[in-house]
């Protein structure tokens, strides 16, 4: 790690924060079956818990951009991470007590913290990417995926060792509290934007980005990509356990395989984007994800489901980070546009999986995953909106 305020220091700090975010997320996602067992609830009730998490995030996402603009990305990550850590402690207590309402309340608060944390880290990542003059956002998201993979493998090991999810969450709360209070000091210095008439920012309304067709279309693109990723994050382990009769440990391993495939593509995806452009890479990615989803859902056994998970993860790798980069093409308005695109994306990422849980009550969770294909098609249709653009001054 370099000196605080340097681009190199900010790059490495952003990698760490993305990775920690993934690790924390997987600590919950990979062990959803363990939560269901501890609380003795069905797939539909799990969906209700996920809805509480999604609701907390969706309600707080529109505030994340203005908060980051006012106090800086470093302080926003600190605030969001601290809230998430407190929520993890609350969730652990709810699991110890077997309280479904307590778990729902804790996940709602967790959703608020993660929303602030996630938007802030993406704004920071976009700023670092612009200063480096090369595509690096997929690598930041690879750090998230790598953290999630490590978290999934830890979850699988703890499941085998029969370590309670509540104990796991308490340890993660301490780790998060320490990391978010120290690492963000290496972020780029916070400089509040001072709009002037030369870039037209002074004439823009507070919600101007929401009225921009390109920004909204990028949001639709990210919405589909986010559901593609989020559905696997929340349900691939449970679908493996329930749909294929596998153990909780095998379910966690399938989740880890999905994440590993996604991580690998994110590590090398920047080269593809710089060579062939966002639009072509997006179209190939979403087609691959669609094929992988179909293979996973229709697989009669675990080995074929593994193959589907590999394709699904590879195809889901680049849509979300490319959307963030596309929203940040113009530095003058990057923060507000990233906030808009993040909000639209996380509506699907966080609210979509609960819907799949309710649907799964009637058709089975593996069959419910087929609903994701609808938004995959939407992402394919809106891919041209992400085409690289030079900054426009108005």
Image: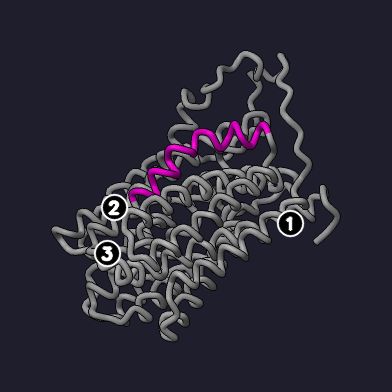
Q: Residues within 10 Å of mark 2 (few under 14, many from 20)?
A: many
Tell me if I can see residue 160 in this picture.
yes
Find disc 1 in the rendering and name its residue. Answer: 182
Q: Which residue is drawn at 63% across and 58% down?
A: 177
Please state which of the two labelled residues, at mark 3 or mark 1, is closer to the viewer. 1
Left or right relative to 234: residue 65: right
Judge by depth and name the residue closer to the eye, 306 or 114: 114
Task: Determine contact: label 3, label 1, CB under 8 Å.
Answer: no
Find disc 2 in the rendering and name its residue. Answer: 48
Position of residue 344 relative to residue 1, above or below, is above
Query: Is residue 8 on the magenta stretch?
Result: no
Q: Which of marks 1 and 2 is nearer the N terminus?
A: 2
Left or right relative to 58: residue 179: right
Find disc 3 in the rendering and name its residue. Answer: 294
Q: Quadrant of the N terminus?
A: bottom right
Q: For the residues marked 1 and 2, what is the alpha-carbon distance in whole angstroms?
A: 34 Å
């Amino acid at each position: 790690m370099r000196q605080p305020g340097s681009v190199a220091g900010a790059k490495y700090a952003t990698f760490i924060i993305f990775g920690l975010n993934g690790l924390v997320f997987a600590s919950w996602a990979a062990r959803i079956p363990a939560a269901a067992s501890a609380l003795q609830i069905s797939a539909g009730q799990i969906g209700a818990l996920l809805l509480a998490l999604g609701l907390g995030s969706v309600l707080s996402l529109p505030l994340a951009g203005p908060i980051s603009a006012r106090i800086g990305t470093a302080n926003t990550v600190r605030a969001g991470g601290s809230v998430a850590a407190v929520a993890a402690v609350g969730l652990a207590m709810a699991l110890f007590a077997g309280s479904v309402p307590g778990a729902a309340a804790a996940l709602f608060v967790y959703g608020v913290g993660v929303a602030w944390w996630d938007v802030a880290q993406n704004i920071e990542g976009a700023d670092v990417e612009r200063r480096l003059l090369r595509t690096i956002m997929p690598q930041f998201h690879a750090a998230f995926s790598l953290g999630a993979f490590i978290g999934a493998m830890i979850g699988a090991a703890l499941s085998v060792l029969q370590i309670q999810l509540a104990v796991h969450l308490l340890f993660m709360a301490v780790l998060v509290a320490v990391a978010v209070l120290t690492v963000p000091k290496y972020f780029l210095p916070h400089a509040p934007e001072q709009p002037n008439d030369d870039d037209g920012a002074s004439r823009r309304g507070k919600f101007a980005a929401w009225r921009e067709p390109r920004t909204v279309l990028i949001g639709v693109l990210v919405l589909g990509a986010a559901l593609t990723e989020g559905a696997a994050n929340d349900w691939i382990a449970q679908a493996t356990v329930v749909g294929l009769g596998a153990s909780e440990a095998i379910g966690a391993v399938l989740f880890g395989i999905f994440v590993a495939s996604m991580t690998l593509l994110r590590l090398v995806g920047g080269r593809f984007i710089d060579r062939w452009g966002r639009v072509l890479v997006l179209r190939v990615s979403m087609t691959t994800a669609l094929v992988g989803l179909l293979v996973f859902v229709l697989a009669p056994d675990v080995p074929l489901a593994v193959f589907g998970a590999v394709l699904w993860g590879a195809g889901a790798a680049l849509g979300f980070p490319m959307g963030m980069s596309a929203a940040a093409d113009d530095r003058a308005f990057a923060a507000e546009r990233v906030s808009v695109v993040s909000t639209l994306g996380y509506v699907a990422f966080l609210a979509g999986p609960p819907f799949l849980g309710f649907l799964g009550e009637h058709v089975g969770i593996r069959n419910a995953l087929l609903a994701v294909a609808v938004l995959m098609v939407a992402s394919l249709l809106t891919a041209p909106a992400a085409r690289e653009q030079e900054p426009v001054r108005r």
